[in-house]
Amino acid sequence: MDERRAHQRFSCDLRVRVALPDGRELHGQAVDISFSGICLHTNEAVTPPTTVQFEVWAVLPERETREIVMPGRVVWSTPVEGQVQIGATFDRDMDNRSWARLELLLQFLEGNLEDAARL
């Protein structure tokens, strides 16, 4: 783990929908996620420090998981290989259900959740 980070990041390939304050939605793929935030690829830049809402879910061989809704704030946005990479932090005031679902997702990504049906 990077010693400068408060929480371990997990590489992932999760679907992400980003709800912007103006009502538009962006769709993308998360490349890493932690308790602190998320890094994703999408087709459009978002100017920091825009407040957004993330909906994140996994596509498993047998099904798609339910979305985890997490408010957050864009910290940076940069072009990468024909797309835009966005880094964001999660809002500390996120509801307990979302925190619990995020914890299950991180356990799954770490390989410590035996029953994927819990996602």
Image (cartoon, grey):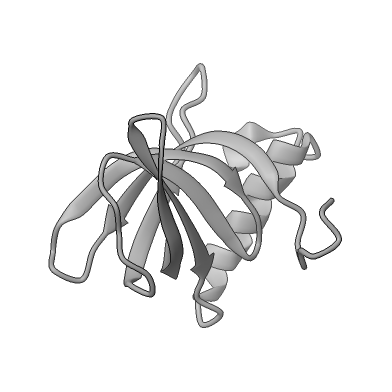
Percent from the top left, x then y, of residue 117? 59, 35
Percent from the top left, x then y, of residue 42? 33, 41
User: With respect to residue 60, does 69 lie above or below?
Assistant: below
User: With respect to residue 76, does 104 lie above or below?
Assistant: above
Query: In the orientation shown, which residue stands out farthest toward the bottom?
Result: 93
Left or right, residue 26 beside residue 9:
left
Q: Is residue 102 visible?
A: yes
Left or right, residue 10 beside residue 71:
right
Give whichever of 60, 4 is nearer the camera. 4
Quadrant in which the C terminus appears: top right
Q: Residue at x 73, y 46 (%)?
A: 107
Q: Residue at x 77, y 68 (%)?
A: 6
Left or right, residue 13 beside residue 20:
right
Q: Quadrant of residue 115?
A: top right
Percent from the top left, x then y, of residue 44? 25, 47
Q: Residue at x 31, y 66 (%)?
A: 47
User: With respect to residue 19, does 116 lie above or below?
Assistant: above
User: With respect to residue 116, does 37 lie above or below?
Assistant: below
Q: Residue at x 23, y 64 (%)?
A: 20
Give whichever of 108, 40 is nearer the camera. 40
Percent from the top left, x then y, of residue 33? 60, 50
